[in-house]
Image (tube, rainbow, N blue to C red):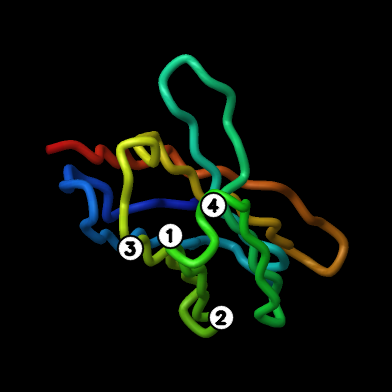
């Protein structure tokens, strides 16, 4: 059994900062790619940022220079530092991780989401 849990969302004023965390726990053999996705009201869930197990990162253009994705492989955790937040960043943010529970079994896991609201 594997669990992925996000934390750190909340209400922030435009221009402010938030740091999201994602913790994976359970029967984990190895974690491969991890990513942050977001879903704004009435819209589809979209990719925000990805990070490989080796630390390579990729961002959607709208967050480049403002958001930073990172991970701590020893703790099975991933983070998203969000700076210069804009109202259009308002969304539920989801953690996604590709996790192997054995050398022969790998799956894709989602957290329950954490709400980020950017408003004055």
Quadrant in the picture for the C terminus? top left
Give the mark nearer the N terminus: 2 vs 1: 1
Residue under circle 4? Answer: 36
Tell me the tag on residue 70: none
Element on which disc 4 rests:
strand
Q: CA distance from mark 1 to mark 3?
A: 18 Å
Element on which disc 3 rests:
loop
Give the mark nearer the N terminus: 3 vs 2: 2
Q: Residues within 10 Å of mark 1 (few under 14, many from 20)?
A: many
Q: Residue at x 34, y 42 (%)?
A: 114
Residue under circle 3? Answer: 83
Above or below, comparing residue 35 to residue 32 in the picture:
above
Give the mark nearer the N terminus: 1 vs 4: 1
119 horizontally vs 1: left or right? left
Give the mark nearer the N terminus: 2 vs 4: 4
Q: Residues within 10 Å of mark 2 (few under 14, many from 20)?
A: some
| Residue 83 picture location, percent across and down | 33, 63
Q: CA distance from mark 1 to mark 4?
A: 9 Å
| Residue 66 picture location, percent across and down | 43, 63
Above or below, comparing residue 1 to residue 32 in the picture:
above
Residue under circle 2? Answer: 73
Q: Are marks 1 and 4 in contact (CB under 8 Å)?
A: yes
Q: Nearer the viewer, residue 21 or 56?
A: 56
Q: Are marks 2 and 4 in contact (CB under 8 Å)?
A: no
Q: Residue at x 59, y 57 (%)?
A: 49
Q: How many numbered marks are there?
A: 4
Q: Residues within 10 Å of mark 3 (few under 14, many from 20)?
A: some
Q: Are marks 2 and 1 in contact (CB under 8 Å)?
A: no
């Amino acid at each position: 059994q594997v669990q992925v849990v996000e934390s750190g969302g909340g209400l922030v004023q435009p221009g402010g900062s938030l740091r999201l965390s994602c913790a994976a726990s359970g029967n984990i053999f190895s974690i491969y790619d991890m990513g942050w996705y977001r879903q704004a009201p009435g819209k589809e869930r979209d990719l925000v940022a990805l990070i490989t197990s080796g630390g390579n990162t990729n961002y959607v253009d709208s967050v480049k220079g403002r958001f930073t994705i990172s991970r701590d492989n020893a703790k099975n955790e991933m983070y998203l530092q969000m700076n210069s937040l804009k109202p259009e960043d308002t969304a539920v943010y989801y953690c996604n991780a590709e996790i192997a529970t054995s050398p022969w079994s790998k799956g894709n896991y989602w957290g329950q989401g954490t709400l980020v609201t950017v408003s004055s």
